Amino acid sequence: MGDVRSHYDDWLCPFCGAVATRETQDRVLCDSRSCSCGAIGLAAPVVDSDEIVDDALGVFGVQVSAESRGFDHLLLEDLRNAGVEVREGQRTRVGEGFWGEYISLWFRRPHGAESG
Ligand SMILES: [Zn+2]
């Protein structure tokens, strides 16, 4: 595997306003950083933002309803229903053309909401 990481570098956490610097420990496909406040940022090209949602569902172990599959806004609703906060991060152009516009979404599960 080659290096598929982008040069997305706007890891400003929308929850606490700090710049997230930690590598995310969870297994994710997207570019990712973890913030000291507990939030996880995931970045992907705007046209590929379903990968962000996929990664978030995996990280938080959220079960999705059958009718949500394939619909990002419904999947995000499933995440919210599971107690995960979702916020939009920085939208940045990191390359040329269609694939160059990146978006980040941030996810955080409030303290105490974790089960097990
Ligand atoms: Zn934060």
Image (cartoon, rainbow, N blue to C red):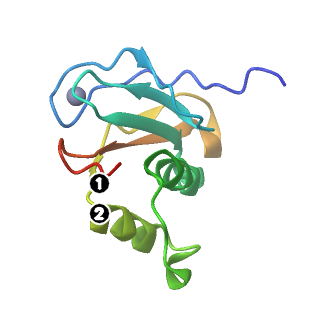
Residue 51, how many percent across, how many down? 58, 51
Q: Relative to the observer, which residue lies in front, 79 or 43?
A: 79
Question: Mark 2 = which residue?
Answer: 80
Say few, some or many: other residues with alpha carbon within 10 Å of mark 1 (under 14 / 14 to 19 / 20 or more): many
Which residue corresponds to the image point at 28% horizontal and 48% vertical from the top-left?
114
Numbered mark located on residue 95 in the image: none
Side of 35 where 37 appears, left or right = left
Which percent across, then down, holds residue 59? 48, 45
Q: Is residue 52 left or right of residue 15?
A: right
- Which residue: 38% across, 69% down? 78
The residue located at (30%, 24%) in the rendering is 35
- Relative to residue 100, is residue 58 depicted above or below? below
- Residue drawn at x 42%, y 33% as measured from the top left: 92
SS of the residue under disc 2:
helix
Residue 38 rendering spot, x and y as whole percentages: 27, 31
Quick one: which residue is furthest to the top in this view?
21
Give left or right: position of 42 versus 1. Answer: left
Determine if the C-beta at disc 2 is less than 8 A from ligand 1.
Answer: no
Seen as rendered, the residue at the extreme front is 116
Amino acid under disc 2: Arg
Which three-letter amino acid code belongs to the residue tagged 1?
A: Val
Report if the CB atoms under discs 1 and 2 are less than 8 Å apart.
yes
Q: Position of residue 19 (x, y in %)?
A: 27, 18
- Regarding mark 1 in the picture, which secondary structure is present there? loop
Which residue position holds label 1? 84
Crowding near the residue tagged with mark 2, few <14, some 14–19, many ≥20 C-alpha atoms within 10 Å: some
The N terminus: image quadrant: top right
Q: Is 81 placed above or below 13 here? A: below
Q: Residue furthest right?
A: 1
The image quadrant in which ligand 1 is located: top left
Q: CA distance from mark 1 to mark 2?
A: 5 Å
Q: Quadrant of residue 84?
A: bottom left
